[in-house]
Amino acid sequence: MNISEKILNAGIVGAGGGGFPTHVKAGAKVEYVIANGAECEPLIHKDYEVMVRYPDKVVQGVMLLIESTGAKKGIIGIKEKNKEAIDAISGAIHDPRIKIHLLGDFYPSGDEFILVYESTKRLIPPQGIPLDVGIVVSNVETLYNISLAAEDQPVTEKFITVAGAVHRPLSFVAPVGTSFKDAIAFAGGVTVKDFGVFVGGIMMGKLEFDLDQPITKTTAGLIVLPKEHILIQRKSRTEQSMRRIGKSACDQCSYCTELCPRYILGYDVQPHKVMRSLGFTMTGEQMWNQYASLCCACGLCTLYACPENLYPKEACDTAKADLRTNSVKWSGRKEVIPHPMYEGRRTPLKQLIKRLGIEEYNHPSKFQQKKLNSKNVNIPLSQHIGTPAQPIVSIGELVKRGQLIGEIPDAKLGARVHASIDGVIKSVNRNIVIENY
Ligand code: SF4
Ligand code: SF4
């Protein structure tokens, strides 16, 4: 069995949040494999811990992807500030084809377009993917999972950071399907009465109040904030209200565009023009919506750049959805030339953390060697891009950790799903619930 087949069997998907089935990437032919260790979501440090604790596995994952894709080189992107991770990974590299590329501490340096440019000076074409420039990008935890797949171990666990308003901010390993409630309790519980949880990060994650929701193969972190925190207040606004205040208060200062990481890299993303769509009828709207097509939803325009606290990122989200509904294809500028101010306009993470008002929570989330031992797990059949897996177990059946419980439907893009604990199947619908016996 080759490594692509082993990756498929192991149910590996992009662990950095993307969720793209990794066996598809492993089957491509490319020149470079890039390991994404940039990790730029504020307060999340689990990739750092993966690199410090398991450097051999990360490097082995790069080697296996080099082998399967026929790549000539491997590049591991790590922030210059993460000295321990750099030392650990350097010590694990024994092949001259693999090098470390040092990254500055900017947000969002983990964006694939930015990471590819920073480490190879190649520019992905508008609406393209790294493959278009001969590159495959994989998160460092995904690479760790690839090295386990080579030993026929499927994905049953997730590295995660739990931080913010909790007693002991931690990074640790938990079975896939563990509830937020159990994960937060493992971090000592919350320090405030009323709170919300940013799942996957403050900038690009979603706000959740239901603690029974499960950790999936793509959950990088849970950031707990008090309900009265401005970030929760802002995120809780209805779309209608965001549009209403945007329409009346946007003065077209264009700071959102001037600081947009995709715009400064040379792509035609102009959120201030998308904001104009709020005041237009359908016809005018579509013209302005086009400027959202290449937005990566990093959230910087809404949470950092806009002096009026408006919602250009959310306007871009709506614009992109409208373009998809109306099957409007992007027809903008094709050439990509980085802005002359690219270097100077990048957003330092430190400054972003200050602007977000989360400095008091910016502590190292220490790695807890002891794994969280969940008694119940609730495993979604869809934790990836593509078609949900089909359940192949029934209620009452006994399963072992690592056993296949969800299969990829015939000829579809998808990922296999495995039991993450020993137990009995309690329910099967869009999720499979297992209770430890
Ligand atoms: S930064 Fe804010 S006020 Fe300025 S153009 Fe963008 S959305 Fe409008
Ligand atoms: S969310 Fe805003 S800042 Fe980020 S890429 Fe989209 S338009 Fe640019």
Image: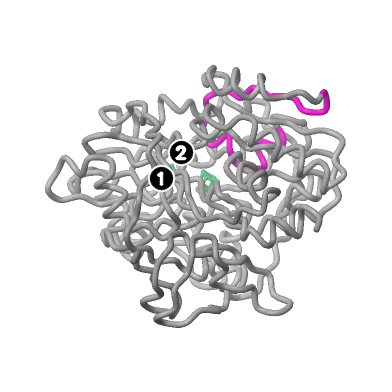
Residue 344 versus residue 96: which sits nearer the camera? 96
Q: Residue 41: which numbered mark, if any? A: 2
**Are the two marked residues, 2 and 1, in contact with CB atoms closer than 8 angstroms?**
yes
Q: Can residue 337 be seen in this view?
A: yes
Residue at image mark 1: 221
User: Range of the magenta residues?
Assistant: 96-117
Q: Which residue is drawn at 60% across and 41% down?
A: 111
Q: Residue at x 57, y 32 (%)?
A: 54
Residue 111 covered by magenta stretch: yes
> Looking at numbered disc 1 in the image, what kind of residue is underneath it?
Gly
**Number of the label disc, if any, that sits on residue 337:** none
Q: Is mark 2 within 8 Å of ligand 2?
A: no
Amino acid at the residue labelled 2: Glu
Asked whether residue 302 appears in the rendered view, the answer is no
Q: Which of marks 2 and 1 is nearer the N terminus?
A: 2
- Residue at figure coordinates x 69%, y 61% from the top left: 8
59 over 175 or under it: above or below: above
Helix, strand or loop under label 1? strand
Q: Distance between the residues labelled 2 and 1?
A: 9 Å
Q: Is residue 98 magenta?
A: yes
Is residue 256 depicted above or below 419 in this figure? above
Name the one closer to the observer, 113 or 397: 397
Q: How many marks?
A: 2
x then y, percent, for residue 239: 35, 63
At which x and y percent is residue 243?
37, 61
Looking at the image, which is closer to me, 248 or 17? 17
Q: In which quarter of the image is the N terminus?
A: bottom right
